[in-house]
Image: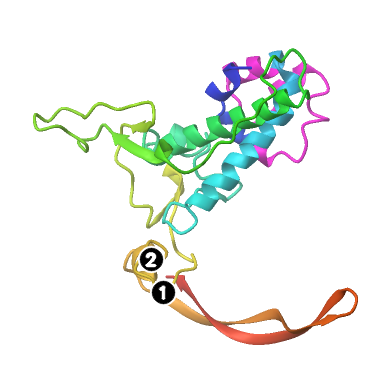
Amino acid sequence: LRALPRCCPGCRYLAKQPSLREVLRDPSGCEGLPGLVEEQVRVCRRQVGAMGAVKRGAELAVEECQHQFQSRRWNCSMLEKGFAYGPETALSHPTAGTRESAFIHAISAAGVAFAVTHACSRGELEKCGCDRKIRGVSAEGEGGRWQGGDGRGEDPWGRPSPYTAHDLVYLSASPDFCNRDPRRGVFGTSGRRCNRTSPATDGCELLCCGRGFHTAQEEVVERCSCKFRWCCSVKCKQCRHLVETHSCR
């Protein structure tokens, strides 16, 4: 089972699969899973019973990545029938080796390791000797530090600073992610929602890369005039009002 997190980048494709039960009725079904390389297929065959947990881990990784980067130019989205950093885009193109790619590898490994360990400790997997105690993990802390090899983080003699087990190591500078370039796994920020008054990464000035933004009116339906009725329910009206929205040009 320890081999699963090491080869999980292709397993991110599993997060898109509606179900693995029919596909993996026998180990030969592993060869039909899209996005898996030869080593991953071998692991799947040996641990076919764990692939459901791997799929859950991949889903957790995608959800957490999208949450962490939702207000940035690179938002870890699944776009145009594929992952922005799936094997058909960044992992086989010039953006491989960037810090975003490093994060994808790290969070995929973490998601799979967590899900497999959780399933193991619950007795859901055969041939699994895990501690029954599940220790909590946090997405915060030191796990998100970048450590680059492209000239950043150098000592006074121009040598790269030493990195630790808590650093994500990357080799290449990232694109700015402003303009659409599917060949490199970059889908741009055109059409993304932005905050007109925010100076942070979700603000229109930064998110739209200086291109400006469109403003529109959108009707929103919300619950309002709620009243508690004995016993025991809450009755609300449906209120409609217009809100101003902004999206990148």
Identify the magenta region. Answer: 15-44
Question: Could you tell which of marks 1 and 2 lies nearer the N-terminus?
Answer: 2
Q: Which residue lies at the image location 38% right of the left edge and 52% below the top edge?
A: 177
Mark 2 highlights which residue?
208
- Horizontal relation, residue 23 to residue 144: left or right: right
Instruction: Report helix, strand or loop for mark 1.
Output: strand
Q: Does residue 42 belong to the magenta stretch?
A: yes
Q: Residues within 10 Å of mark 2 (few under 14, many from 20)?
A: many
Which three-letter amino acid code belongs to the residue tagged 1?
A: Phe
* Residue 114 position in % (x across, y down): 61, 31
**Seen from this angle, which residue lies furthest left?**
157
* Total count of labels: 2
Query: Depth check: 191 or 104 in front?
Result: 104
Does residue 35 appear anywhere in the picture? Answer: no
Mark 1 highlights which residue?
213
Q: Quadrant of residue 13?
A: top right
Q: Which residue lies at the image location 52% right of the left edge and 46% below the top edge?
A: 65
- Horizontal relation, residue 165 to residue 243: left or right: left
- Horizontal relation, residue 115 to residue 77: left or right: right
Mark pair 1, 2: CA separation: 7 Å
Do callouts 1 and 2 mark residues in contact (Cβ within 8 Å)?
A: yes
